[in-house]
Amino acid sequence: MAIRNVLPVLSLCLVACGSTADRGGASGQPPPSNAPSAQAFGRGGDLGVRGRHVGKVFVIAMENHNLTQPSTQEAPQPILGNAAAPYVNSLMTPGNPNAAQSSYAVSYHNAGVGVHPSEPNYIWAEAGTNFGNHTDADPTTANGNVYDAPHLTRQLDAARVPWKNYEEDVQLSTSPLKSASGTNGPVNPYNGTTQFNYAVKHNPMAFFSDTDTENVYPLTQFSQDLAAHAVGRYNWITPDQYNDAHSALTGGFTYKGTLFTGDQASIAQGDNFLSQIVPMIMASDEYEDDGVIVIWWDESEDGDDPSRTVPEIVLSHLAKGNAFASNVEMNHSSDLKTMEELFGLSFVNNPIPSGETNAFGTGFNSVAIVNDLSDLFVPGVIPGPRTFRVTSGPTIAVPGSQDVLQLVTVRNSGRSLAPAPVALVLDNLASGVTLANADGTSAVLAPVGSPFVNLTVPGGFLFPGETTAALLRFTDSGSAAVSYDTRVLTVAPSP
């Protein structure tokens, strides 16, 4: 390999690596008048559909029922076609007025094999993994179910996105971290009884040391906040264990003139709750301003195979509407990925336990490459895939050594903001060549074991059209040419 003067490359790196933020113009100069500003990317970090962007997000967590299941499974009964769930079924019936702004998933499956009981699924909704948790215990260090790891509401805090966690009956407990139930509470405004049941296992933020008691409000405050425009940009709503269809009230539940008992009563209670809170949200200014309601169920029942689907419904002016049924493969990681896309956040990549990664397709439950919820919305609502163009300069030998330098430039060639971290991964590096200045090797997203470097992203975002660069230093122990394939990730390749 010919030895060339290395100084021009080093000089170029001082400009390209030290200051990435030309944003369409020369380094240090104002962007051109036609360059998009941060404000142009609106609430969700993308230009959106005809200038419209998702506004407030409301996630309502429901419990313990499949959408569809094998005919041989008798209990619990599925939601689809169930006489105890007329409202939910109206949202999935084309031509029904309630379904005018609804879409739903028909191929939404359990996050992973063995991800049960409830608690691991709520943790997964926050962090893209259950950390091996298989308990419903209240969070304590002794129980080993308090985590200090990347998760959604930590990201929202860091990005200064306001969020609220509404938990029904939490005010009847001594702490948001302690479950509480009884029969002598105040009259429940949804089911008319004095029974209450706050379960921490259904409060996902409670299992993370930085958000365990942050922004927790009783559900009784929700209607006031909604009317006063005081809800968050992201709102998690957990009904108590009677209104989320988990448990039947004592004596059953009379709904629309029919007395339901047992599990059918729990389904009717959940349907009754949704039939009141969903229209209340839809009647609000917050929903009218392109808000989104996600009705989410926690887990499949009696199996994690494709024959048991989990209900997932979205309502929005931006949804495809008229009970559009999406057959795109989805799971809890899809919801998390969508929220991170909407709020311009990096994708979490907490390791998934090896025995719980059963896939119905490549990347079934890894947040960075799972399908998001975009098929439930009209095109352009959910920011598109982050795409990059990588340009490699000439390799230049360092005199008196076996080292080779190469300047690599990475350009955000998509329409979405790329939040830090941004990493350049070198796959299939030539035999005998090592990346001497690697920051680590990929350990989560396949292929694993590839060296990577973290790219400089001033301000925390790589804007569309913006570039950053890295000076790679290779050690070549033989005469092989430096060659590799590139990947650009907006997750930490190694946790």
Image (cartoon, rainbow, N blue to C red):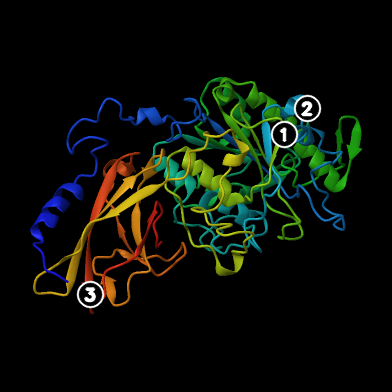
Going 52% across and 34% down the picture, which residue do you hit? 380
**Which residue in the structure is indicated by mark 2?**
96
Quadrant of the drawing holding the C terminus: bottom left
**Type of amino acid at the residue the image marks with label 1:** Ala
Q: CA distance from mark 2 to mark 1?
A: 8 Å
Going 80% across and 53% down the picture, which residue do you hit? 69
Number of numbered markers: 3
**Which residue in the structure is indicated by mark 3?**
476
Query: In the figure, residue 363 lies in which quadrant?
Result: bottom right
Q: Is residue 317 above or below residue 211?
A: above
Task: Tell me if label 2 and label 3 are in contact, CB under 8 Å.
Answer: no
**Type of amino acid at the residue the image marks with label 2:** Asn
Query: In the figure, residue 480 lies in which quadrant?
Result: bottom left
Going 73% across and 51% down the picture, which residue do you hit? 309
Q: Which comes sooner in the sequence, label 3 or label 1?
A: 1
Q: Is residue 22 above or below residue 431?
A: above
1 or 421, which is in the foreground?
1
